[in-house]
Image: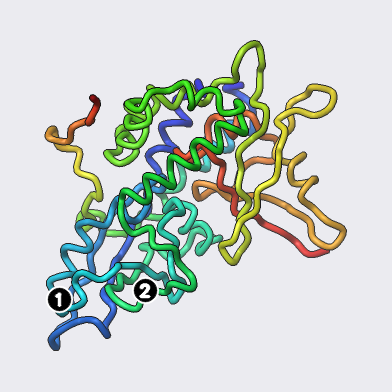
Amino acid sequence: ELSQEWRLHNLDQLKRRSEAWKDLDLEKYEKAVEMSSWVKSGEA
Amino acid sequence: MANDREVLRIVWEGQVPVCFQADPDEVVGLQQPEDFYLMVSRLSYLPLVTDKVKKYFTKYISNELQDGEIWFDSNGTPLKSHYPIGVLYDLLHPEDDGLPWSITIHFSKFPEDILFKFSSKELVESHFMSCLKEADVLKHRGQVVSAMQKKDHNQLWLGLVNDKFDQFWAVNRRLMEPVGEQECFKHIPVRFYNEDGTYMQKLISPINEAGQKRTLDDLLNDLSTPSRQAVGVRSHGVKIHGDTPLQWMSEHLSYPDNFLHFCMIYENI
């Protein structure tokens, strides 16, 4: 399955999505979700 | 089962750069606020990622509007807060153009005839869990989700909210396995979106009568009519290969609510 053409095509397309950002100044974008250590899982 | 971690990971990491703007009619004072730029997950929902946006623009809005029900529009189209962000973007950008995505935030004049009030995280959570349960009914007659504990449901939700891939998939993998000796789900949870943002659902089997796995092209044939041919689907910002098996798609390309969300591409005959 890993070498099937449909899988490689889909994976390649997914990887290429960020190419549309190449002209953007990404430094000015804030992250919506902070990944800092104080974010707790909330598990009981 | 959903064991192609490379695909799961890249789907999870899908993002959209967004430029949020104020509604000029709601701004107090002569100077318009600067735009607010945010990178948001395609898999999330607007109410889960817009705390910073609301806080930023609140400073520029009159006091009486600050407690209003906020909503968003893109180029005049009100955005449904209970649709995943990636679905909203793909519906409005079939060619993946127009980045960053310009969205206007509103603090008044909520369009009640068009949008449901899903602005709180609790309401979105309730909707999300409802979708997840519906998907499990289609896949496993609801047997998996009903066997889970409340803490498992919380882990799924918090994994999505906090962008924690491992936390989410530690539970979600159980929803992505066929039960018993089966190789496939009973049905594939999928929503087919039209250009106007409405969607339909159908009972979709992952296998044909001979027991062979059905592909996306098989599904497109089923959805075609004498006057209109379904020629493809877009999901997660890409056009999916027609030979992709439906079972694999459900396991790897479903949104966290366990549904495939397909923006349909039709050609008139």
- The amino acid on which the numbered mark 2 sits, given as a three-letter code, is Phe
Q: Residue B169 or B215: which is nearer the viewer?
A: B169
Could you tell me which secondary element the residue under label 2 belongs to? loop
Question: Residue B219's x, y, as percent?
Answer: 74, 42
Which chain is indicated by disc 1?
B
Q: Callout 2 environment at 10 Å: few (<14), some (14 to 19), or many (20+)? A: some
Going by the image, does B267 lie left or right of B120? right
Query: Given this view, does label 2 or label 1 mark the residue nearer the observer?
Result: 2
3D distance between C-alphas at marks 2 and 1: 18 Å
Which chain is indicated by disc 2?
B
**Residue tagged 2:** B110
| B55 up-or-down from B158: above or below | below
Residue farthest to the bottom, as pictured: B30
**Residue tagged 1:** B60
Q: Residue A3 or B81: which is nearer the viewer?
A: B81
- The amino acid on which the numbered mark 1 sits, given as a three-letter code, is Tyr
Going by the image, does B145 lie left or right of B183? left
